[in-house]
Amino acid sequence: MLEGDIIAYPTEAVYGLGCDPFNEQAVTRLLALKQRGVEKGLILLIAHWEQLFSLIDELPQALLLPVKNTWPGPVTWVFPKARHLPEWITGSHDSIAIRMSAHPIARELCKDHPLVSTSANQSGQPPATDLRSLCQQFPQGIDAVFEGDLGGSSKPSDIFDVQTGARLR
């Protein structure tokens, strides 16, 4: 992924939009493309466990057991964020949402670096589930599209709070 690019790629259920989460200009462009406010925060996609620990605050190992049972897969977990994470990623939250995807294309895209993972849709519109709907919603603004089949899930990822186990979505 080139620095500053916004990409579209298949995930388990829908096409996602992504960029380098540590590139403020790229994140700002992505949020403008989606017509989404920064205060909501974003989900980050990772490919392996080592990436997780640089993004979150320290947690007891027991709290990570449910996460280990669902990853890789279509489950997002909300963790206490590492102090160094910028507001343009976490929004108004003191937490960070992270998913370790099982989709081969999504995993490959974030194998060296976490990736923003947000559904490919403008605010209030249904997420793109194919290239046609992706191009209809975003006729411009996406720098690269990684084509591939969706993973077969019928809905976006479930979201859970790692500290309470509560289902958030």
Image (cartoon, rainbow, N blue to C red):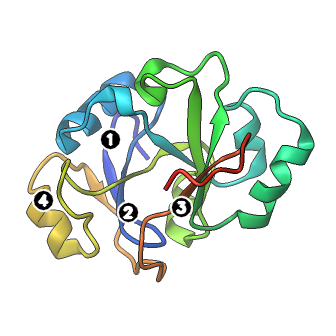
Q: Position of residue 87 (x, y in %)?
A: 45, 19
Q: Nearer the viewer, residue 45 or 95?
A: 95
Residue 121 vs residue 164, the one in the foreground: 164
Image point 40% across, 42% down: which residue?
Answer: 19
Residues at discs 4 and 1 in contact (Cβ within 8 Å)? no
Q: Are marks 1 and 2 in contact (CB under 8 Å)?
A: no
* Sequence order check, earlier mark of 4 and 1: 1
Q: Position of residue 126 (x, y in %)?
A: 22, 64
**What is the C-alpha distance between the residues marked 4 and 1?**
18 Å
Tag on residue 5? Answer: 1
Q: Earlier in the sequence, mark 2 or mark 3?
A: 2
Residue that mark 4 sits on: 137
Which secondary structure lies at badge 1? loop
Work out which residue is located at the far right of the displayed protein and give it: 61
Which mark is nearer the camera, 1 or 3? 3
Would you call the spot at circle 2 few (<14 residues within 10 Å), some (14-19), or many (20 or more)? many
Q: Residues within 10 Å of mark 1 (few under 14, many from 20)?
A: some
Secondary structure of residue under mark 4: helix
| Residue in view at x 27 percent, y 63 percent | 127
Instruction: Give the label, 2 or 4, closer to the camera.
Output: 4
Mark 4 or 3: the one toward you: 3
Query: Disc 3 marks which residue?
Result: 158
* Quadrant of residue 6 within the rendered picture: top left
Residue 60 higher or lower than 117, as above or below: above
The answer to whether residue 149 is left or right of residue 99 is left
Q: Which residue is mark 2?
A: 9
Q: Quadrant of residue 113?
A: top right
* Number of numbered discs: 4
Tag 3: amino acid: Asp
The residue shown at (22%, 73%) is: 131
Name the residue type under label 2: Tyr
**What kind of element bears circle 3?**
strand
